[in-house]
Amino acid sequence: MVNIGYSILRAEGDAKRAMYAMVASAILNMVLDPILIYWAGLGIAGAAYGVLISMGMVILVMVYWFFGRRDTYISFHRADYSPDRSLIADMLGVGLPASLEFVLMSVLSIIINWMLVIIAGTDAVAAYTAGWRIVIFAIIPVAAIGTTVIAVSGASYGARQFGKLRTALRFGIAFGAGIGLLLSVIIYALAHQIAWIFAYSPESAHLAPTIASFLATMCVFFPFVAPGLISGSVFQGTGKGLYSLIISIFRTLVFCAVFAYLFAFTLGLGEPGVWWGIVAGDILGGIVGYLWAQYYVNRLIEVNRDDEDDAGATSVSAKTM
């Protein structure tokens, strides 16, 4: 429910209000957790209660915004709650593929962990898991841009302003690639310091060099996250969730998993081969996604131009008659 409210606000262009609600929920959760866990003596259950209370407060705020204050673009009426099969189908056409994309990420993680266990044991999995947290951190800004591109793409597609759709695709990729490049440089330069955060104890100190090497390798594909992710956002914004899912399938199962196996086992590169397989798969997946999205948008522009030319010719013919 909370995520639906966030999505509605972002779709209206009111991303700041969604951010305020998310920040308030996070701060409230951070304040409540130590109180409920330690002072109230609830232990782990206190953490769960903290999440429930903070999320409940956000829900109340959302209800006030949408039903009490009514200052949003979208208004809710009783008639809106009647089932609309076509609308439900459109939502599932985007939502189900998007959900399956997260499943694919989990499947890829299982495959990668399996390869690492065979090649180098559980220490390799521990280093990969720790380093991947930083990779996710580096991807978050690009994912945020992708969320914005979904809203912009949907508005442009609905208004049949396909030129703006192409602008959103190109600007989103350029901006995301720039952020990815900047984070690549920063993380590469601080790889050893970051690795120490995860391996500061005597028991885990031996993992630090491996984590640092993993981060230095992963930095290579950060600038290439944007083409694939933003392209998928354009497809989702235009109702082509299946296209975005196909890109994810190729990137995760076809490219990343296959390249990781080839580099690690066939070429005998071992643990670093798995890392470079992920890098190669993500880069190739991003390029394929961008080429497909660019072709899709160009086709929309061409078809729309042809329709306008036909409409103009019909109008001129009618006037001459």
Image (cartoon, rainbow, N blue to C red):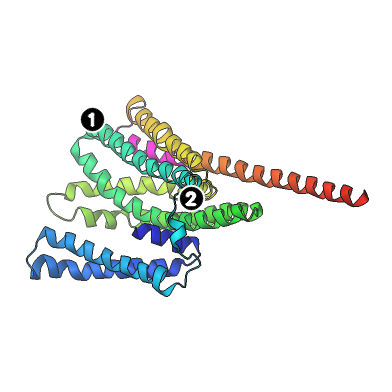
Residue at x 37% of width, y 70% of height? 20
Q: The disc labelled 1 sits on which kind of residue?
A: Ile
Identify the magenta region.
269-284
Q: Is residue 316 visible?
A: yes
**Which residue is label 1 attached to?**
118
Q: In this orientation, which residue lies closer to the viewer: 78 or 188?
A: 78
Label 1 – label 2 distance at C-alpha:
32 Å
Q: Position of residue 300 (x, y in %)?
A: 65, 45
The reply to whether residue 181 is visible in this rendering is: no
Q: Which one is in front, 196 or 232?
A: 232
Q: Amino acid at mark 2?
A: Ala
Residue 283 is covered by the magenta coloring: yes
Please determine whether, in this image, residue 114 is positioned above or below residue 177. above
Q: Could you say which disc has been placed on residue 42 in the image?
A: none
Mark 1: which secondary structure? helix
User: Is 189 on the left-hand or right-hand side of 147?
Assistant: left
Looking at the picture, how far across and down is residue 55, in whole percent? 27, 63
Q: Residues within 10 Å of mark 1 (few under 14, many from 20)?
A: few
Measuring 43% from the left and 59% from the top, which residue is drawn there?
Answer: 7
Sequence order check, earlier mark of 1 and 2: 1
Q: Residue 177: say if magenta.
A: no
Depth check: 176 or 198 in front?
176
Image coordinates of residue 175 in percent, x first then y, are 52, 58
Q: Seen in the image, is 276 located left or right of residue 179?
A: left
The quadrant of the picture occupied by the N terminus is: bottom left
Decide whether the magenta segment is chiefly helix, strand or loop: helix
Question: In percent of the image, x 43 and y 56: which residue is there?
Answer: 81
Residue 226 numbered tag:
2
Which secondary structure lies at badge 2?
helix
